Image (cartoon, helix red, strand yellow):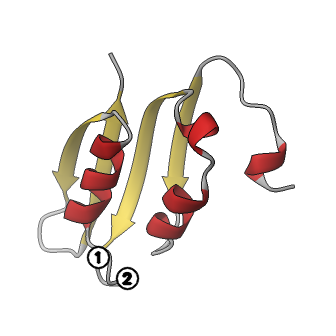
Amino acid sequence: MPIATHKPPARVILTEDGLGAEKAILLSTPKAYLQRVRKIAMEYHDHLTRLKHDRLRELLEEAGFSTELKLVKGLPLGFLYGWRG
């Protein structure tokens, strides 16, 4: 069942490993749902998509998250964390 059909709980912690589909996942998530997410952790794959981790970070910050990147040395992937408050 698509995420948009569920009423989000009051506080949400979201983890994501979209294997290159991170942009599609973020952009297709309804704003009302994303606004209820307190923390998000995602693995990004710069080698699988044209949308690189710096743009993913901007998308989260535009949605009101503070962010932190953890790069995996020598690999085109890493982790992006976002939190509110």
| Residue at the image point whose x is 84% and y is 46% from the top | 5
Residue 45 picture quarter = bottom left
Q: Residues within 10 Å of mark 2 (few under 14, many from 20)?
A: some
Residue 61: x, y in percent? 28, 42
Which residue is denoted by mark 2 in the rendering? 49
Residue 77 picture quarter = bottom left
In the image, residue 59 sits, relative to residue 49, either above or below, namely above
| Residue at the image point whose x is 29% and y is 76% from the top | 46
Nearer to us in this view, 16 or 73: 16
Q: Residues within 10 Å of mark 1 (few under 14, many from 20)?
A: some
Residue 16: assigned label: none
Residue type at tag 1: Asp
Nearer to us in this view, 7 or 43: 7
Residue 21 is left or right of residue 8, and the answer is: left
CA–CA distance in space, label 1 to label 2: 6 Å
Residue type at tag 2: Thr
Which residue is denoted by mark 1 in the rendering? 46
Residue contact between numbered discs 1 and 2, judged by CB atoms under 8 Å:
yes
In the image, residue 23 sits, relative to residue 37, either above or below, namely below
Q: Secondary structure at mark 1?
A: loop
**The C terminus appears in which quarter of the rendering?**
top left
In the image, residue 82 sits, relative to residue 54, either above or below, namely above
Residue 39 picture quarter = top left
